[in-house]
Amino acid sequence: PRLRAVVGNCCLPTYSAIHEHHLLHCFPNFVPGWLQVGDTPEIAALIAPRALHLNLGETDGGSPIDHARAGIDRIAAAYQAYGVPEQFTHFIEPATGHVLSEAMWEKVRSVFARHLGA
């Protein structure tokens, strides 16, 4: 496959969080009719069984952490169903917003080194 590993940074805004918290978010994120079959965690899980790592800031207003944690659980369940739970990892940095922190950057480097040999 062309994609062997994906890292997302501060990018798990669920449609349910957008509606519940009345977030003004990126309009390109909206896929008409998608909520009938899932939410952004289900979209993210489509990369399975390939490696996926998500970095999140605990106080990122664009990805409310309660929704992000629930989304992480759904993605993890998809990877478990594929029999490759180790291929999905995540990192939530406490007291951090919508940034690429040094700790997050280290996770990016580690994931790519492990899966791409970089």
Image (cartoon, rainbow, N blue to C red):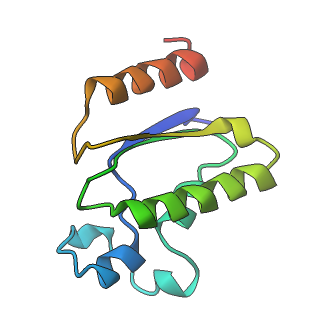
Residue closest to the eye, 66 or 8: 66
**Front residue of 57 and 8:** 57
What residue lies at 38% left-to-right and 20% top-to-bottom?
106
Looking at the picture, how far across and down is residue 18, in whole percent?
30, 76
In the image, residue 23 sits, relative to residue 69, either above or below, namely: below
- Looking at the picture, does residue 69 appear above or below residue 104? below
Q: Residue furthest left?
A: 24
70 or 18: which is nearer to us? 70
The residue positioned 62% from the left and 62% from the top of the image is 74
Percent position (x, y) of residue 76?
Answer: 65, 52
Image location of residue 15, percent across then percent down = 38, 76
| Residue at 55% in and 19% down | 116
Residue at (34%, 25%) from the top-left corner?
103
Please state if 79 lies on the left or on the right of 51 as rendered. right
Q: Is residue 78 left or right of residue 117?
A: right
State whether residue 94 is above or below residue 58: above
